[in-house]
Amino acid sequence: MLEPSVQYRSVIRLTETRDIQSVNTTFLDILNSVIHGRFVLYVLQGIGRENRFVLSSEVNPFGPDAESILALFNPKAETRPSLPKDLRPFPLASVNGLHAVLIVDRKAQIQDEVFLNFIITVYCNQFNLVEACSYDALTGLMNRGEFDKKLYQLLDNHGQSNRRNEAVNSCLALLDVDHFKQINDRFGHLYGDEVLLLLGQQLPKVFREDDWLFRYGGEEFAIILRGVTEDQCEAILERARSAIEAYCFPQVGKVTVSIGYTYVDQIETSSGLISQADAALYYAKSNGRNQVQRYQALIDQGALEKGSEVVGDIDLF
């Protein structure tokens, strides 16, 4: 049995976490002190069009047997494989549903099983709390607070890569619904919210699995593309714009979006990147809407001056 002081510190560490990655990392550290033997943690994440189990541990020591266990928790699985006798699954669930699956070797020694069950409950509750603070309730995308964290993480990774003389290229884009005020005025705010909700469902389908999607505020969304070339940025964002234009929103019909983006190939400040993407978005909105504009290209064309602030009284909505 673990010492009470160890248990208390473990609970405090877990409840101090403020993002999903830290919750999972801290939970794994605690598991290492409780389980003496092989185990693996798979976390359920929304990726692209569906939820998928993602390996949270460094390695999977059980190979295909672990995949067989995960199939037991997949409602879409066509067959139900038998449970490997030498493995023990712990479904990690709360009132909000399944969060993860912990798989433990039956030969492993669990130092304190009562505490293990308790810390699993704490983990699920903390996961719920952090997730509620990280995602937008209407669209299901990551929220503005999570955007600030991810952008800081992106710039930190760029800084480290530059110090190692490695090339890590990314893109920050801002997407805004065209004439959104008119949608609210004509159809009502309820249908305006429906447009945002449906956009939250459509965007993960038109972007890549590794892209980060956020509801930036109001009818504006932010997208961070990682590990992309300049040509890929343009193609990915244009594909998204075109797909939204082609989609028929049930109540309001056709909706278009404008996108402004900046290519991140050097160290920038977060405020600088946001200002660049915002300037490109403003240009797109004020020059016909329903288009994709790149900040660097606008600078080269002389359409924008580097470092200039967005000014004017044009109606962006």
Image (spheres, rainbow, N blue to C red):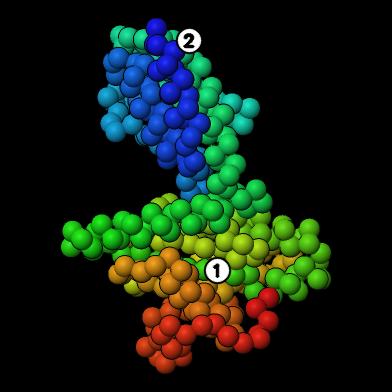
Q: Residues within 10 Å of mark 2 (few under 14, many from 20)?
A: few
Please state which amino acid type lies under the numbered disc 1: Leu
**How far across and down, in percent of the image, does residue 119 sit?**
48, 20
- Side (left or right) of 276 relative to 165: right
Q: Which mark is residue 137?
A: none
Q: Which mark is residue 175?
A: 1
Q: Would you place residue 50 above or below residue 209 in this image? A: above
Q: Residues within 10 Å of mark 1 (few under 14, many from 20)?
A: many
Which residue position is annotated with label 2? 114
Secondary structure, mark 1, is strand
The nearer-to-camera label among 2 and 1 is 2
Instruction: State the residue in front, 256 or 184.
Output: 184
Please tell me which of labels 2 and 1 falls first in the chain: 2
Q: Residue at x 51, y 83 (%)?
A: 309
Please state which amino acid type lies under the numbered disc 2: Val
Q: Residue at x 37, y 22 (%)?
A: 31
**Residue 232 visible to an observer of this rendering:** no
**How far across and down, in percent of the image, does residue 252 sit?**
74, 66
**How far across and down, in percent of the image, does residue 110 sit?**
37, 11
Q: Residue furthest left?
A: 165
Instruction: State the residue in front, 251 or 107.
Output: 107
